[in-house]
Structures are given as structure tokens and as C-alpha cells.
Amino acid sequence: MPKASQRIKTYQNPNGQQVSTVDRRVFTQDGLTFKDIDGSGSLSAVNDWRNAPAVRAAAYVQQLTVKEKIAQLFISDWRMAKYPMTGPMAAMYKDMERKSDEYGILDEGEFRGKTIFGEQHLPSTTTLLKDWFNRHVILRANATPADMADWMNEAHAVCEQCEHFIPVAAASNSRNENGELVFGMNDAGGVMATWPGTLGIAAAVKGYRIDLVDKFAATVRREWNACGLRKGYMYMADTMTDPRWQRTYGTFGEDPALISEIMTHIIPGIQGSDKGVTADGVAVTTKHFPGGGARENGFDPHYAAGQWNVYATPGSLETYHLPPFAAAVKAGTASVMPYYSKPAAEKSAPQRDLQGNVIDMQPYGFAYNHYFIDTMLRGQMGFTGYINSDTGIAHNMAWGVEMLDVPERIGFAVNHAGVDIISGLFDNEAGQEAYDRAHSDYYDTHPVPQGFTKEQLVLTDEALDRAVTRTLTELFALGMFDDPYRDPGEAERVVADPADRAAAAEAHRRSVVLLKNDGTLPISSGKKIYAEAFLKNSEQAQAATQALRSELKGCTLVEDAAEADIALLFVSPSSGEYFNATPGYLELDICENKTVHNVDAEGRPTADTHTETTLAGAGRLAEIAAAVHAHGGKVISNINFTMAWQVGNVERISDVLLAGFDTYRDATLDVIFGRFVPTGKLPMTLPKGDEVLAVNAQGVCISPNDVPGFDKDRYMPDNLKDENGKAYAYRDAAGHYYEYGFGL
């Protein structure tokens, strides 16, 4: 039998919904074609595409079994037969059975083992879809457009064989930005039109025009829709206020006003409308409510030390962190992802909600926090979509509810807080247990955990139906029940669109920020150039150096910096390890073998020390500069900013300094050689040095972690301020402050 992509039958209704099927029955009535979605064989409220999505969803929920509905509560990682797991998950799944279907499309292997999110059981794809009835998966494979469409088509075809048809809702993190593939942020890259990192998009918008975001969003919508990928875990509305937060990479910087403006454009552009998703749109999950930027000295909530959101400054939550989410809600975002962390009442100053009420800082992770989700997000912001938790909240990242068992955590999240999808594992059995406890005498013989009620901890029919209705409504609105299939050949053609590639290339050039220039730029022809790339990994640096030199064809390259007129240095630091705490605070200095203090379990500095390296060969930068300067040559340095690096070690030895944000090298070279006049502006403030990030014995940072860089001077000690009243931002010898919005 041919694969599903070769068996698609399509029916075009005049002035109405297109219908496509592989094996599912269709029928005609009143000259129109309908799909037998619910298996009734009649023109039911579910099958009639003329009905509103919410009407169809509400009707379908009444037909589904409890088992089928519970399966809709969970989403977890999934895989494609041709593409093994990558990133931090690769090692965990290395012993997984490798088996594919007859077409080499669906992965039919099985896995049991421990992951960073908990004990995982992954059955074959067919078993997951037909027997377990799960429909929500996260695809991280960096697949070709045709392979992605083939996978989606094959999965939908399997789902058509069930009594009740529900299409597969495959989500992905972003796929249209350049940079290292980072689990949970950008799972794939280089296949679709590739723009700079999100910080680079913000830099380009700040220095140019917001319509750049419109072009970006339209590209994402066309490419993803063509591949059948209809849900994105993107983008981050978080305001970056703690510079040591590793997920700075993935934000749009530190200005809530700019982030809000971007949300206002990017969400309707991707979804197809400012009223929500459309039949040619891609659903957006805005993350991480109510903002992950207010970290405690950079500690990330993937690990226990970072489980708190600290709002040390009065009113900081309302002023800096909530506005971008309010903008996202107003722009019609389909879903919202709460962060792992929980509010730290004891360490926070009074915070008020959008109605001026003092916020009840319930000590629960935000996916369990009724006040933040129901009172603030839904009640005050007017959010009507669904809540999709971050990955692992029911197991390894259950901050604030560690005393509950897994069924109770599921009940507390769904029934009490109002979560609609729980990410991490396929916890169908635990979900069934939470449901059974609502309909049994379980708590007559088992104690209710102190501080909770039975009603909060069980999964009721009302809560279950509410959650499933919300997610089904989105699938109906996307047209996925009626027309889920996509043409692999068309997917390849759409993704290869030259206009989209050209728009991305322009964004790369516009993302370049010129921080310092003594008149050296642009470089005139005939100069002898020494070129070298520096990374944290020296082997990767060697490969990057070769790639850089290959892009300098036509230039006179020299192997010895002492012979060069120009030293061209591409500097790409890296700090920390994703999903793991560092022995100390995340290092922002561009350094090698720097001695820094450890921190204790409470996040306070200790007398013990360790060494940190953010750039292999950092000490050689000054040596190269000295060799070039000795005979009147010039040093041009480009720093790649994934975080708010302390630039002093590089700026002081450079005659020209540029900033990129996972910007293509050729775009930076266009600026250096005068082929493009730079327009980019800094999307975040660069800290002066260790002194403005110092943490006292009680673990309190001298610069407040809940306030953006452009406002930190209001709270800095007077003894650190210069004659202009500035203390936080780096200042170069020419007197320029490398603060938000700066760029020559």
C-alpha cells in the first residue's frame, strides 16, 4: 500500500471548507462534502464544518470516552523514524529500540527509562495514537519539509483508523532562527528561512522598523503550515531583567514596551489574525507567564536552586514583566505557558495586580498557581485560550507541590489552577487515577495533604471537559479535523521561497550593532587581514576560524598577526550548562580560567572557589591586538551576544567593536567592508563589570534582578555612579554607554 501522502483525497466545497482524507469516510449533503469525524455517519454538530469551532468542540467532548479525554491532557517529546533524538535528550534515548514503519516514516520503537523530566515510557507511534489515544506531541527533529509533511500525514492517517478521529497536534520550539540548537528554545535550524536570534530581531526592530517582524511572522506561518506543523512553543514574552539568566537567549531583550510591540505583530502574523488562529495559521504558545526574567542571581528553575521568582523592587511585576503578556493576550495568542518557578513572598516587595490589588504570593509553581492563572491571566487580562504547562511540572520540576503525588499534582494543576495541557510525560495512568479519586472513596482512607482540599486534588468531569474543549476548539479553528493533510512537494517549494530567504538576510544585516568605530570602518581594499574565531570550545573555534577565512576570499590573509593591517576577531562566548546549576553564579565576563566563588544551597556566595571559562583563548586577544597595534594596525572585534556579556576585556583592545546576535558572518562582513550601513541598536544593557553584579553575604545582588538594565541606576549605590549618575552600563573610552538602545 502506498504511504499516506500518496493516498490523500481532497474535496473542495464551493465557497467553503476544503476536506481531505486518506481512509476516513466522507459524505455529501446539500451539495457539500463533509468528513465523518465522530464516526456517526451523519451530519452531526461535530461533522458540520459550517458550525463554529467552539460549538463543534463542545459537542465532540460529549462523545469522547473518559480515557480518550484524559489522553488529551498530556504532551511529550516524540520522534521521527529517520531522525534520532538530538541535544540533551540524545544520551537519554541512546539505547532506545530503533524501529520504523514500512515507509521509514513513523518510529515504532519503544523506550522505558529515566529522563530529565521523570521516568518515561514511550510506546510505538501507532500504539500511542490508536491504543493510548494521545494526540499532543513535541517534534524536535530537524527534518526536511517533505519529511515533516510525510510524518504528519502518516500520523493523521493512523488517527483516522480510530472510532473517533482527532488529528495529531504536533508542537515545536522555534525553527527559523540561527544559532546553536538548544533544547526547549530552538529545536531545529537551517532548514527553513533562517533569521538571526530573537535578540537580533529585537536589535533590528529597535534600529529600523517593526514591519520586519511582520515579514518574519508571515514567513513562519507559510513555512510551518506547508509542512503540517501547526503549533509553536514560541515566542518568549519574558522581560530580561537578570542578566545572568541563561534563557536571555530566546528573549526579545529588556524593554517591556518593545517586547509588547513585537507581540502585537508576531502573534497575529503567525496565527493569521488578531482574533486567534485561522485555517492557514499556526497556533502560538506565548511563554513563560508571568515572566521568567526575574531570576534570583540567574538561577534557572530547571533546577531546584532557581525555583523562586524574586520581585525585590516594589511594583516591578506590574511595571516590567506583565505588560508583554497583556499585549500577547490582546493580540489573540492561542495559549500561554506558565513558568516552572514560584513567587518568593519573603524575598519580594509588595506587588500589585492589574487592578491595583496586592498580589497573593501563593508558594506554588505558576502552573499550579490559581491566583496568577485564573485571577490575573484570565480574569484581569481576559485570556480565553488554553494553558499549556512547561515540561516536567508533574515530576522533576514540581516546585511548591513536592508533597503531592503525581495524580494529585495533575488534579491540582487542571482542576484548581486551570491548566489544560501538562507537558513532560504521557501520564495517562496518573490522570486516570486523579479522575477515579474524584469518583471514589479514596480520601476516606487516605489523608488529604495538609493545606489542600480533596476538591483541589482530583480531576473532575467539569475540569476535564473544560480542558479538552479548549484544545479541540483550536484544532477545529485550524481546520485540522477537516483538512489536516499537506503536500510534501509543496512544502519543499514553500520553504525554498527566495523572497523569504532575502528577507531573512536583510534582518541579519540589520541586526548588527556598531558599538565602537575610530574611523577604521569601512575597510578599504588591499589590507592584509589576520582572521580568527574564538569560542568556548577550542576545537569548534578552529572550525569556525576556517569558515571565517573561507568567507574572506579575495582578501589578502596572513597567518601572523604581526604582519596584519587588520585583525578580524569573531568572539562567541558561552556560559553555564543548560538544565544544570553551575558551582557559582553564571559568569558573564569574557574570560579564561577566572577564579570565582562558589555558592551554597541557598544561593549565597561561599569562601570556596572554582575556575570559569567563557572563551577559550581569551588571553590571546590582547596578544593579537598588541602585535597588530605595534605597527599601527587596527583590531576589529565582533561579539556574539546570547547573554549580556561584560565586554571590557574585548572593547579595550579593539578599535572597532560590533555586536551580533547569532547573526550570519556574511552579514557582519557586509558592515565591515562597507556593503551595508549598520542600523541595529542594543536590545539590552551591557553591565559594566563584576562590581555591578556583586552579591552580598545574604545572596542579594547590588543591582536588582527584577528591574531592566535601563532602569537599574535608580537603585544603584551612589558610590558606584559617575558624573552622569550612571553606574550599571559599560562605558567606553569615548564616553559611550553600552545601554539599551545604543548603537552608532
Image: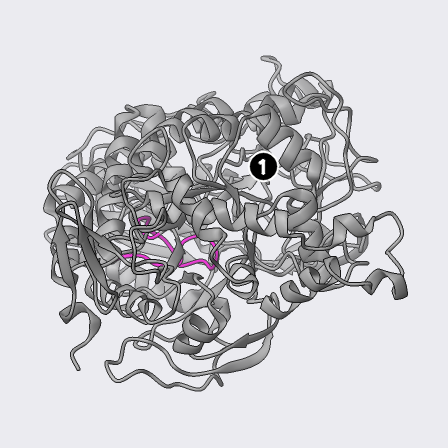
Q: Residue placed at 36% from the left, 43% from the top?
A: 637
**Could you say where residue 176 lies in the image, as x and y percent from the top left?**
30, 49
Q: Residue placed at 80% from the left, 55% from the top?
A: 601
| Quadrant location, the C terminus | top left
**What is the magenta segment's predominant secondary structure?**
loop
The verdict on residue 179 being magenta is yes
Vertical comparison of 353 with 434: above or below: above
> Disc 1 marks which amino acid?
Gly
Can the viewer see residue 658?
no
Apparent side of residue 420 relative to residue 721 in the rendered image (left or right)? left
Apparent side of residue 309 relative to residue 229 in the rendered image (left or right)? right
**Could you say where residue 491 lies in the image, as x and y percent from the top left?**
17, 57
Can the viewer see residue 519?
yes
What's the image's color scheme? one colour
Say which quarter of the image contains residue 725. top right
**Could you say where residue 115 lies in the image, as x and y percent from the top left?**
58, 72
Q: What stretch is highlighted in magenta?
A: 175-190
The verdict on residue 87 being magenta is no
Residue reaching furthest top? 724
Vertical comparison of 433 with 581: above or below: below
Q: How crowded is mark 1: few (under 14 residues within 10 Å), some or many (20 or more)?
A: many
Say which quarter of the image contains residue 668. top left
Q: How many numbered circles are shown?
A: 1
Q: Mark 1 points at which residue?
A: 291
**Could you say where residue 73 lies in the image, as x and y percent from the top left?**
54, 57
Q: Name the residue nearer the viewer: 210 or 411.
A: 411
Apparent side of residue 605 relative to residue 431 in the rendered image (left or right)? right
